[in-house]
Image: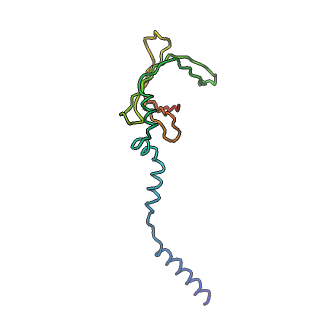
Amino acid sequence: MKSLKTTGMMAFIAIATIFVSSCQVDTNYYEDNYDQRYSWWDDSYNYPSSDLVLMAQTLRGHWDGQLVARGVDANGYAGVKSYYTDIEFDQYNSNAIYGRGRQRDFEGRNDRNPFTRSFSWHIDNRTRAIVITYDNNYTMTI
């Protein structure tokens, strides 16, 4: 009988615990996590520092010169290719640290059929790196 009372009491405590506890979601966790994950967006896009804005304003415009690309092809062979490149960075507005751009690669200075691709760019406020994301989703960090 004592064993039955003890078992019954333990079952009652277990069931009572289920009714006393709540299943409410702690919204502060999600809000804090959201702020941590997207703080670069808020800081960079809404409140950029003056040195990042100056960096973006310096980047704005046309840049050209020789580009040397080093890589490995599908067969595992290393290769080097040299291009004449014209790259243009458009700043979204005068206080933005992001924008769009276009890159044109020429085989030579007189090449009439350049390889052209568009991209979006932003300056990472933590590392101060220029992040270029081409329209085919290839990302390059400078």
Q: At 51% from the left edge and 31% from the top edge, which residue is drawn?
A: 140
Q: At 43% from the left edge and 43% from the top edge, which residue is drawn?
A: 41
Quarter of the image containing the N terminus?
bottom right
Please state the total of marks drawn on the protein image: 0
Q: Quadrant of residue 30?
A: bottom left
Q: Quadrant of residue 57?
A: top left
Q: At 47% from the left edge and 31% from the top edge, which residue is drawn?
A: 132
Q: Nearer the viewer, residue 119 or 56?
A: 56
Picture coordinates of residue 91, whole percent (x, y): 39, 31
Picture coordinates of residue 122, whole percent (x, y): 45, 35
Q: At 57% from the left edge and 18% from the top edge, which residue is drawn?
A: 81
Q: Nearer the viewer, residue 11 or 126?
A: 126
Q: Residue furthest bottom?
A: 1
Q: Residue furthest top?
A: 110
- Asked whether, in this view, residue 4 is left or right of residue 125, the answer is right
Picture coordinates of residue 14, whole percent (x, y): 53, 77
Picture coordinates of residue 101, whole percent (x, y): 41, 27
Q: How is the image coloured?
A: rainbow
- Position of 120 relative to 70 (above/below): below
- Position of 31 relative to 142 (above/below): below
Q: Quadrant of residue 102?
A: top left
Q: Nearer the viewer, residue 8 or 72?
A: 72
- Asked whether, in this view, residue 13 is left or right of residue 48, the answer is right
- Position of 69 relative to 18 (above/below): above
Q: Residue furthest right?
A: 77
